[in-house]
């Protein structure tokens, strides 16, 4: 049954002729507000859509915090979405609501009280405000998918509860603005409502414990992106596709109806399957564990099942590839026991990884399963599995930070260290520090505690994922392994089914360690930046027995951080280490080593978060692939037939990765094309970023530059890698980054499998999605054997004059 509905739309034509549309949608007799606040909302949306910061600031009260506006008008949006706006009357005060069609985790509504008679944006209202008064307890959601029409129809019976009895605050819930409401009712009677952007206001009193029934629909028209989508072959629903209140955790029962040859999946357990008329099928998934983000997926999948640690595992693939399916299942089987042993149990007793064409360039966690774009499948499944604990068992509303991404990234590092050893773990840490600083070139940094308040972009990855992972590593180093893992298990247990923040982890850490740890979290989550140091007053003194005393001052630049820094003096006949507490701008260091000193190194194992400067970072995609230049992926035409075919396949994988990465806004490349070494022209060499695929002798373009690379190839399948020396082993892959010899503002990447088997390895085995930021590295089946930083200055290292 459809209840009467109306919409009021105001059109504003600017002097330049641009059109801004602002709508307040009303149902069942609600009155629309056409006054000054509504016109104010229109002008605010227009300023955002025209990317005019000054125009928005002119509408705000003096002193308003508009950092989010700066970020919103400067950050590129690959989906080309437009801001929508409207007004709601809440407790007799007009709210101005500004909304986007949301990506999960990444976008926010912005709410303001109208001031000065509706002529100015007054105090900003916390987006979490509705959740301080109301919660959704559970959902009974039914979705009917029509892939031919790219349409979905929805009904939901959702139970609501007041946070505090007697609180008169009205019920406000969130439903994505692209979903058209057909009716809202309670106990069979229509319930009036009004909508502004993503927010829906109940127009009559609602009692705690009431079950509301909503019917709505959406026609999907956009291409694959970072948003919910229904396409011909698959569907993905996430981010505001069902009613939520401030993303507070809720239980769910999800029934998905679709074509009979489609599979479907949602969170929890499959509890019912029914054949329907019209060659359709319905599957019901029940999740008794409250989660903040509920997700559903469906498509023409090929399903492969597996068992590990007592857990049924599965892959759901749109484009079935047995090798990728088996690799994903093996990766899950290796990571799952580690997570269970170190973090404790989770409420889900099965796990699946799902390939989707609805996403571009990323993966998304679902706690009992996760979804992946084709290029990401299954390379990051260890990370997404980690979210079953961090984001799933313990929830995050993303109104403050992405703490769960930080902890999950570090969880992935722990599994990588278990599988591939200390060298790979150290390279991950080195990359985190460099990626953190590289991602901030020309972009603002928000403290970890406020990271989700800025527009999602490459700087979010640098802070939330890279810096956040290093903060977790430093916490482990501060506490020791036993206390660290006890802390995580206690955190997962005490906050199960609840939303948490960095402050909650800080409280658990202090309790479990028996000492106050607030200073650590204040330093690393409430202020930006990382360690920046250099050496001063380095002196040596010869001692008896051929020993040498080294004295120096380790100097922090900027506001000092508190840390325990390991210092290593490397000598001609041995090394010596000392760990010193660093709290002030200058710290005295003394070591005694055998023989003649060669180097003095602060943090030789890359255990701390550093903020390396531009001359301390090798050329890398995080800095160089945002300038809207073309990318050419060049495969060789030499070698035997098997090796040539492997180069072509590897080039194709790289092209898919960069297409999805650029489409998702994580790079800005004007064109991406794969060519052979014979087809690469002089103009391509001068103008394009280049990725050269193949070994010397098989790729003629690589032969042209091999003498200038930070890696040297030797006969017999060995590699020379600077200080690391000569590296040998089975199926070596060598990867390097450098500035192109044809144009120093372009990036030259080489990817060289030295054997056919190495060339056929999936790219993430040796060149992971985090893209190591170092000049060159060599790997064998995922294990890093060595890495080099050619021509990179490191102020943490002091080199003695050895003459």
Image (cartoon, rainbow, N blue to C red):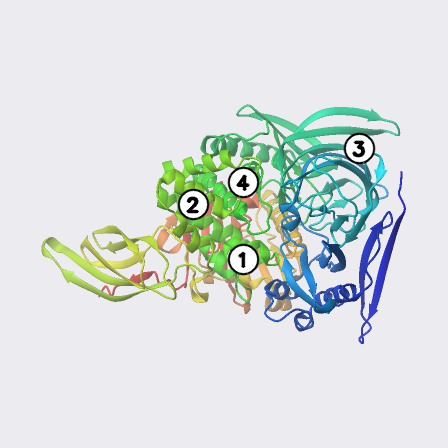
Vertical relation: 275 (above or below) 760? above
- For marks 4 and 1 on the same chain, the one whose residue lies earlier in the sequence: 4
Looking at the picture, tell me which residue is in the foreground, 718 or 722. Answer: 722
Residue topped by disc 1: 749
Pinpoint residue 170: horizontal percent, then vertical percent: 72, 47
Vertical relation: 538 (above or below) 129? below
Spatial distance from mark 3 to mark 1, Cα to Cα?
46 Å
Residue topped by disc 3: 257
- Residue at 72%, 44% (x, y): give it: 357
Residue topped by disc 4: 390
Few, some or many residues within 10 Å of mark 1 (<14, 14–19, 20+)? many
Residue 57: name its quadrant: bottom right
Indicate which label's residue lies in the foreground, 2 or 4. Answer: 4
Q: Secondary structure at mark 2?
A: helix
Q: Is residue 714 visible?
A: no
- For marks 2 and 3 on the same chain, the one whose residue lies earlier in the sequence: 3
Pinpoint residue 408: horizontal percent, then vertical percent: 52, 43
The answer to whether mark 3 and mark 1 are in CB contact below 8 A is no
Looking at the picture, tell me which residue is in the foreground, 215 or 592. Answer: 215
Outermost residue on the bottom side: it is 15
Looking at the picture, tell me which residue is in the foreground, 75 or 676. Answer: 75
- Residue at 23%, 55% (x, y): give it: 571
Few, some or many residues within 10 Å of mark 4 (<14, 14–19, 20+)? many
Residue topped by disc 2: 425
């Amino acid at each position: 049954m459809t209840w009467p509905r109306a919409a009021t739309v105001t059109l504003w034509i600017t002097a330049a002729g641009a059109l801004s549309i602002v709508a307040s949608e009303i149902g069942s007799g609600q009155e629309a507000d056409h006054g000054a606040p509504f016109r104010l909302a229109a002008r605010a949306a227009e300023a955002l859509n025209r990317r005019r910061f000054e125009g928005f600031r002119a509408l705000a009260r003096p002193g308003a915090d508009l950092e989010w506006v700066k970020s919103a008008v400067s950050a590129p949006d690959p989906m080309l979405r437009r801001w929508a706006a409207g007004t709601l009357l809440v407790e007799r005060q007009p709210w101005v609501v500004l909304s986007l069609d949301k990506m999960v985790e990444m976008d926010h509504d912005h709410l303001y009280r109208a001031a000065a008679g509706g002529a100015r944006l007054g105090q900003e209202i916390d987006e979490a405000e509705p959740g301080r008064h109301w919660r959704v307890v559970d959902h009974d959601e039914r979705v009917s998918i029509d892939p031919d029409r790219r349409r979905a129809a929805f009904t939901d019976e959702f139970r609501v509860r007041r946070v505090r009895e007697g609180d008169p605050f009205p019920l406000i819930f969130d439903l994505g603005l692209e979903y058209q409401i057909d009716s809202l009712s309670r106990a069979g009677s229509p319930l009036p409502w009004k909508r502004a952007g993503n927010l829906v206001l109940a127009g009559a009193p609602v009692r705690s414990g009431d079950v509301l029934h909503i019917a709505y629909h959406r026609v999907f028209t956009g291409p694959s992106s970072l948003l919910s989508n229904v396409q011909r072959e698959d569907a993905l629903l996430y981010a505001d596709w069902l009613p939520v209140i401030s993303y507070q955790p809720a239980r769910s029962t999800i029934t998905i109806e679709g074509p009979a040859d489609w599979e479907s999946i949602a969170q929890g357990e499959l509890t019912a399957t029914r054949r329907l008329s019209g060659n359709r099928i319905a599957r019901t998934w029940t999740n008794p564990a409250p989660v903040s983000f509920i997700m559903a997926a469906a498509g023409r999948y090929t399903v492969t099942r597996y068992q590990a640690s007592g857990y049924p595992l599965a892959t759901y693939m749109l484009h079935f590839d047995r090798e990728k399916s088996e690799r994903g299942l093996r990766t899950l089987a290796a990571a799952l026991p580690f997570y269970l042993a170190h973090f404790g149990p989770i409420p889900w007793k099965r796990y699946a990884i799902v390939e989707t064409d609805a996403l571009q360039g990323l993966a998304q966690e679902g706690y009992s399963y996760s979804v992946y774009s084709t290029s990401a499948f299954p390379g990051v499944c260890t990370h997404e599995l980690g979210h079953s604990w961090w984001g799933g068992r313990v929830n995050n509303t993303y109104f403050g930070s992405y703490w769960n991404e930080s902890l999950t990234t570090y969880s992935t590092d722990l599994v990588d260290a278990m599988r591939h050893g200390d060298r790979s773990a150290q390279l991950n840490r080195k990359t985190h520090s460099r990626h953190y600083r590289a991602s901030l070139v020309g972009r603002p940094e928000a403290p970890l505690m406020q990271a989700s308040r800025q527009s999602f972009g490459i700087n979010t990855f640098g802070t939330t994922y890279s810096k956040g992972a290093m903060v977790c590593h430093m916490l482990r180093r501060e506490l020791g392994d036993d206390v660290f893992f006890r802390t995580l298990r206690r955190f997962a247990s005490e906050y199960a089914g609840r939303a948490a923040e960095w402050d909650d982890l800080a409280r658990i850490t202090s309790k479990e360690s028996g000492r106050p740890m607030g200073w650590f979290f204040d330093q690393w989550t409430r202020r930006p930046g990382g360690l920046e140091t250099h050496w001063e007053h380095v002196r040596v003194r010869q001692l008896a027995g051929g020993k040498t005393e080294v004295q120096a001052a380790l100097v922090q630049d900027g506001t000092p951080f508190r840390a325990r820094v390991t210092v290593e003096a490397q000598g001609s006949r041995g090394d010596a280490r000392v760990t010193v507490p660093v709290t002030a701008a200058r710290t005295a260091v003394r070591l005694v080593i055998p023989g003649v000193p060669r180097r003095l190194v602060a943090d030789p194992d890359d255990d701390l978060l550093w903020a390396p400067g531009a001359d301390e970072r090798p050329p890398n995609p995080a800095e160089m692939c945002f300038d809207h230049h073309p990318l050419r992926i060049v495969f060789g035409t030499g070698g035997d037939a098997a090796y040539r075919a492997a180069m072509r396949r590897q080039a194709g994988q790289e092209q898919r990765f960069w297409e999805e990465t650029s489409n998702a806004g994580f790079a800005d490349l004007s064109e991406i094309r794969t060519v052979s070494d014979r087809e690469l022209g002089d103009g391509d060499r001068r103008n394009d970023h280049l990725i050269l695929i193949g070994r010397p002798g098989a790729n003629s373009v690589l032969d042209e530059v091999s003498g200038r690379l930070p890696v040297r190839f030797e006969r017999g399948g060995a590699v020379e890698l600077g200080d690391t020396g000569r590296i040998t082993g089975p199926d070596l892959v060598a990867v390097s980054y450098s500035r192109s010899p044809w144009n120093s503002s372009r990036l030259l990447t080489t990817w060289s499998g030295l054997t056919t088997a190495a060339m056929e390895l999936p790219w993430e085995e040796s060149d992971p999605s985090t893209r190591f930021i170092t000049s060159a590295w060599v790997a064998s089946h995922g294990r890093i054997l060595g890495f080099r930083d050619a021509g990179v200055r490191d102020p943490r290292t002091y080199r003695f004059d050895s003459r």
